[in-house]
Amino acid sequence: MNDTVILSPSIMCANLVNLEQDIHELKRIGFNTIHIDLIDGIFSPSMPLGIETIKSMRKITDAVFDVHIMAHDNEFFIRQMLEIGAQKITFHLETSLHADRYIHLIKNAGAQVGIALNPSTPLSMLEYILKEVDRVCLMLINPGFAQDKNEHQVPYAFEKIRDLARMIHEKHLKTSIQVDGRVSLEKIPGLIEAGADDLVLGSTSLFFHGISLADSSEKLLELIRRIDR
């Protein structure tokens, strides 16, 4: 895999009736991280994976679990994911009354912590906690609505990434910028140029109907190799 850009396949885009096969195939072709969306059905009308499924996944792979919690009861799901052994846990600031508590709950357990922002949430919300987190996940579509083909990447996506990259630079931080939502082969060069260094890969970049994961992975990696960073 590329050494400078983290590639995080979104397992909700895999074959949900044969997850084990796709999990092993992703590892075989070199992906060491699995992005897992954990949605409570209230934050967003979608529940692709439940806690028991994630527990079962943990038993069959040593891949890094990058869990993106989209829920209202953040502490409950954070504790569940820490118990399972997730190495990276991201939660939404919009549903966090006690964000600082959740940050330290994750860090004290030895996991990396991320903050996720909905497309329209301003970066100013990060003012006091940016230095406390390992990464910020910028949602580029409304989270949980990926199945809606009319849900397009927001027009200010690149601007928001550039603004966050500038904020991180000005504060002399090493915070990673993860992007999620319609991270397509066409958009990836611009996303990386804007400052993203962690790409959540879905149905427009890796999981293509009728194309093997190995073939689509090679196409993706060749694209990233050509990008002049």
Image (cartoon, rainbow, N blue to C red):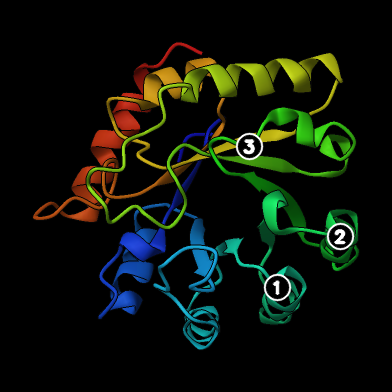
- In the picture as drawn, the residue positioned furthest to the left comes out as 210
Instruction: Report how far apart the C-alphas of labels 2 and 1 lie in the structure.
Output: 11 Å
Instruction: Report how far apart the C-alphas of labels 2 and 3 lie in the structure.
Output: 17 Å
Residue located beneath label 2 in the image: 98
Residue located beneath label 3 in the image: 121
The one of 26 and 152 positioned closer to us in this rendering: 152
Q: Which residue is at 75% across, 54% downward? A: 112
* Corner quadrant of residue 87: bottom right
Please tell me whether residue 149 is drawn above or below residue 59 in the rendered image. above
Q: Report the amino acid beneath label 1.
A: Asp
Neighbours of disc 2 within 10 Å: few (<14), some (14-19), many (20+) = few
At which x and y percent is residue 73?
70, 73
Instruction: Report how far apart the C-alphas of labels 3 and 1 lie in the structure.
Output: 19 Å
Residue located beneath label 1 in the image: 73
At which x and y percent is residue 61?
50, 74
Res 195 visible: no
Left or right of 208: which side holds 44? Answer: right
Left or right of 84: which side holds 210? Answer: left
Q: Report the amino acid beneath label 2.
A: His
Q: Label 1: state its secondary structure.
A: loop
The one of 99 and 222 positioned closer to us in this rendering: 99
Please tell me whether residue 6 is drawn above or below residue 83 in the rendered image. above
Q: Which residue is at 39% across, 20% downward? A: 189
At which x and y percent is residue 182?
35, 39
The one of 101 and 66 positioned closer to us in this rendering: 101
